[in-house]
Image (cartoon, rainbow, N blue to C red):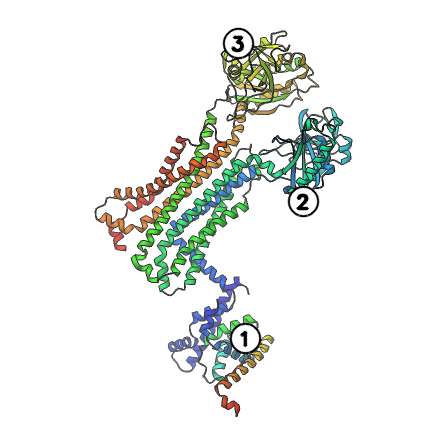
Amino acid sequence: MAKPAQQRMGLLQGTLDMLILRTLLYGPAHGHQIGKQIQRTTNDLLQMQHGSLYPALHRLEERGWVSAKWETSPDKNREFKYYRLTAKGKKQLLVEESQWKQMAEAVARVMWPAAEES
Amino acid sequence: MQWWQTNKRNADLERELRSHIELEEEEQRENGLPPEEARYAARRAFGNATLIKEQTRETWGWMWIERLLRDLRFALRQLAKAPGFTLTAVLTLAIGIGGVTAVFSIVLAVLLRPLPFKDSGRLISLHEHIEGDSHELNVTAPDVLTFERESSAFTAVGGFIGSGYELTGAGAPFKARAERVTASLFPLLGIEPMLGRTFTQQEDDDASPVAVISYALWMERFHSDPNVLGTTVDLDRRPYAIVGVMPRTFEFPLDAGRLSHRDLWVPMSLTPVEKKSEGNNFDFSAIARLKPGIAMPQAQQDVDRVMAGIQAQYPLKGGVKIHAGFALLREEVIHNARPILRILLGAVALILLIACTNLANLLLVRSGSRRRELGMRMALGAARKTLFRQLLTETLALGCLGGAAGTALAVVLVRLAAAKLPDSLPRLSEVGVSWPLLFAAVLLTGITGLLCGLVPAIQSTRGDVLDSFRDGGRGAGHSRKLSHLRSGMVVLEVGLAMVLLVSSGLLLRSFAKMLEVDPGFEPAHVLTASLALPGVNYPTQQKVNAFFSTLQQRLESEPGMKSVGFASNIPIVGQKSGRLIAPQGYVEGPGEGMIIVSNYLTLGNYFAAIRIPLIRGRYLGVSDDQPGAPLVTVISQSLASRYFPGKDPLGLQIKVGPDFASPMPAMTVVGVVGDIKQGARDQATVPQMYEPLSQGAADLGPFASMMGVHGDMDLVLRTTEDPAGLVNALNGAVHRLDPLLPVTNVNTMDEIVAATESSRRFNTVILTSFAGIALLLSLLGIYGVMAYSVSERTSEIAIRMALGATRQGVLLKTLRHAFSLTVLGGTIGLAASLGLTRLLSGLLYGVKPLDVSVMTSALIVLFLCSLLAALIPARRAASVDPMRALRSE
């Protein structure tokens, strides 16, 4: 049943999960902060609509990789839903990181074989 | 969080997303954008919020329930938009499911009541039969013991035999109905006594005077005294100690189709004579419980083995061989009810078929009208899967509504029936809805609904979307095929209803025929009761007669009392005794057996009280009671015409016994009276003869002592007003004569007559209700099809009217359509009933299965009702406003 959603998310999905987990490694953050952070660190190279963060965040929460809680933000004096990396989430980040590395290496070998030999 | 917290979670998501957009908006404003543009920028950066929400919710994992609820809401909205269709479909389901379940639940409870014993499916009843004779006998006393001892297929074998005792020592003396049972019987049935214990084997062997009493006896005679155990009562003047009280629901043995009533049970304790009665007196009943894991054929082998042993030990005279067999006790109890059950099951099947046809028809009609809507939705991008799912949900919702309505109807009808049906039917208080049957009915209609509801879905997923728009959404060829199918279904329904109408008509006519039968007396304004004068206080017939004569005088002086008489047996309640007679000058035909007639000993103004018409001669009177009066008898017309054919019977004589030449005393016929019905009015009668009670012993000549003292008499009181008002006068008069004497069986004759009619009335009412349900369902079918065809042809009708067709013409044309469907269905139904009503012949009285008047009236009822059903759509067709109808196209 969740199939159409996945298709629409495109290839980005797995990557987005990893990026979110990586961002939360710095500490708890709400959706807007996570979005800004990813945008900033990628120098706006990754074109993404902020809204697409939320299905990913909820999926991560459903899997127990992050936990969520409404908290008052220190500066704005307003409540936001803050996401936190769980112990399970930290492990998952390691797994995804190594998978990503392997894939990147594999892709690199196909794309630039000469570079590999030299 | 769980799925039922969806709303809370949705609000939470809403808030989260809003806070994100607001924050973004603020940041954009801080970057210097004007507020309006800031908001748009924030929205743009966020993306499609609705889609995001949807996608987020999908991650929650309980989407399917939410989707189901949404589909359900949608389905209910769709159903609400077509109230006519919904109402008809739900009514069809409700009447089909509810009606059938209710009626059949009552039948199950009344005819097929479950045996009130532990694990009764393994209880069997033993029988014996003589080789070459199909007649089933019970077993002999010694065989009960032998089976108990020798058989290995049963965990236990128990024997019992009916018995009656004069019970004294607990209120007024009365004749107690008792059963002698072996000690093994109660444990075998698995029923514990409510108080105390049942018998031990020791008590059975020693013929100990102990008794277990029924709940009713305990309540009535011992005022529910919890300390009743150990009390003694006298049975035939021998003291018995009460050792146990059975629970209220306990009945044993079971009488098929009615409540059995026993006052007490005593140990079997076979007498030495009984123990030696091998090969004769097959009066004992034996039941047994099959051992776990033993199948019927194994048990039969075991029974054969035991029987062979008995035969070897006690060979019978003339080499007669006896075989034993058994049947499940359950089968035996329902045996008599089987024919009517089979017919009712057939009727149930017909009704469910009608209901399913009706439902199928309605759904097909609807599918035709929805092709356009579905086509439109598909053209707008709805996934086929989604449409399929929604149609499925809609059908399921309809099924649930119908099922719920049907269940409610079943419960209400069963409650009503339990309150309204006559008490003569057993266990009506325990009638409950038969849930397995309800389930089966719901399942069947549910499957039909599913299959038919999916037709439009399958159609919509096939073929070109554009198809559905051609011809304004009703492809001509397709529509014609469907409309033929629909008409065919209505014809089928009408035909099935016709079969049930004819069947119920036949039963109704049988009932009417039975009511037309003259019972031979006038039951209105008659009160009856029974008195049993105990032999202790009334040792001679003179004393008995004197008591009744005094009672007659006292009662006849009561206001409102016309005449009072007594008889050893009254009409309608059944034949209590028979007399072997030899009429003067009658020569028996070859093969004709002994002449046994039904005999009545009377006293007082019996004939006047019950009003049996006098045909010749005179009634019996006071002069016949004088000492030394000549022996006389009054005979019924059938006796006269059969045994004194072509002769004037007055003055001719009758002797008791097989031979008129015997030295028995002769009775002279002094009167001929009309025949009375001894049992229910639809049963055959046996010729009758009446003798004065005072001459009863003398009529037997040398065997006078066989009659003993006849103190059991039925009272017949003819009254001017409502006989029920004289019950107190009767009780008072009896108690002033003998304060201890119980007045039993106090009933008006009308009540007795009604009770004998109850089984026929029950069958008739049940089958007639089935026919009514069937008729109602097929009317709904006719209505549905007519209403749809009118709505479908609105524009056609409008054009016709614009071109000059009259309203009357339109009305008649629509009615003609309904009429032709009915004629076709009625004819098919009639043809089917020609074959099927033969199955009913066992239940009919005075009517042939092919009764023209019944069939004609069934047809007329069918036509009138179908015209009525078609009238509403026809009137709607006739009231079409041509201009408005054409403009809306």
Determine the CA span between mark 2 and mark 3: 67 Å
| Relative vertical location of residue B133 with respect to residue B484 in this rendering, above or below | above
Mark 2: which amino acid?
Ile
Q: Check if mark 2's residue and mark 1's residue have beta carbons within 8 Å.
A: no
Q: Which residue is mark 1?
A: A83
Disc 1: host chain? A
Mark 1: which amino acid?
Tyr
Element under disc 1:
strand
Residue reaching furthest front? B319
| On-image quarter of the C terminus of chain B | bottom left
Determine the CA span between mark 1 and mark 3: 117 Å
| Relative vertical location of residue B586 with respect to residue B34 in this rendering, above or below | above
Q: Which residue is mark 2?
A: B294
Asked whether B23 or B747 is in front, the reply is B747
Residue shown at 52%/46% (left/top)?
B438
Side of B483 where B697 appears, left or right: right
